[in-house]
Amino acid sequence: MSLQLTEVSFIFKKMRFHHLFLLTLLVTTPAIQAQEVSYLPQVGDGPIGVIDLGLQTEFIFVNSGDAAEVEIAFISAGPNGDPMTLDLEGIGAMSEYSFELGSGASKSFITTGAGNPVDGSPQVGYARVTVGGQQAGTNGSGVGGTAVFIQTELSTETIINEAGVPLVKALSEFSLFVDTMGTRNTALAIVNAGSARTGRRSWDIDGAPDPLRHDR
C-alpha cells in the first residue's frame, strides 16, 4: 500500500493576548488506487462458415496518464456471458490477459484467426478491460484503446474489411446518428454488462418515430 502526505492546518487564537498561532500537522493516509472498468463491445476470431473468409481482432492500447496495470477479459456473446478463450499471436490461448502499460506507452496484439482453440469454430463476443494502479482523483485513467475487427480472405491473406471498435464505459442511455442511405450502413455493437433489460428506439431524420424499428 502506498502512502501520501496530506497537510492539515489549524489556526488557534489566544484571546487574552490576541496572538495567532498556526499549527501544521502532516497526516499520513493511504493513497487510494483507482480501478476503472471499460468495454470493447465486439471482438471476433475464426473462419466464417464455408466461404473463404476469416476474422481476427487486433487490440491497441495507449496510455497518456501514469503507469497502469491493464487486465482484459474475453467474454462470449452467448446468453450466459461465459469466458471466451482467444488464441493471441505470440502470447497463447487465454480468456484473460494482464500487462503493464507505462506512462506514454502503447501496446498492441492480435488474435491468430484460428477460432476456438478446441474445435476451430468461430468466436464472437466482447472484452472487459480493467485498469488499475493509478491514483484516484485524476481525470480518468489515461488508458484508451480500440479493437480493430478484421475480415480477411484466407486463401490470399488479403484484408477485405476493417472496423474500429473503441473502448467505452458503461452508460444507461445514449444517442447516435445512423446512416442507411445508398450504400452506407451504420453498425452498432451493444454490450449489456448488467442485469437490466435493454432496448432501443429509432427516429427518422425529421424526428418522427420509425414505425418499423422504433421499439426493440
Image (cartoon, grey):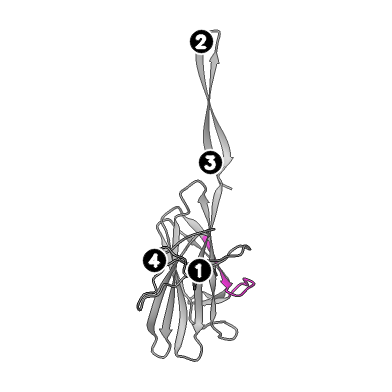
What residue is pinned by disc 2? Answer: 18
Badge 3 is on which residue? 4
Task: From the image, state whether disc 1 or disc 3 is nearer to you.
Answer: 1
Q: CA distance from mark 1 to mark 3?
A: 53 Å
What amino acid is at disc 1? His
Q: Amino acid at mark 3?
A: Gln
Identify the residue shown where x is 52% and y is 64%: 39
Please, what secondary structure does the residue beneath circle 4 have?
A: loop
Q: CA distance from mark 4 to mark 3?
A: 54 Å
Closer to us: 51 or 134: 51
Residue drawn at point x = 50 percent, y = 85 percent: 47
Q: Amino acid at mark 4?
A: Ile
Residue 205 numbered tag? 4
Q: Position of residue 125 (x, y in %)?
A: 54, 74
Instruction: Using the image, determine if residue 128 lies above or below residue 117.
Output: above
Badge nearest the viewer, 3 or 2 = 2
Q: Amino acid at mark 2?
A: His
Report the front residue among 118 and 148: 148
Residue range of the region highlighted in magenta in the rendering: 70-84
Report the Cα–Cα distance between label 1 and label 2.
74 Å
Residue 146 higher or lower than 121, as above or below: above
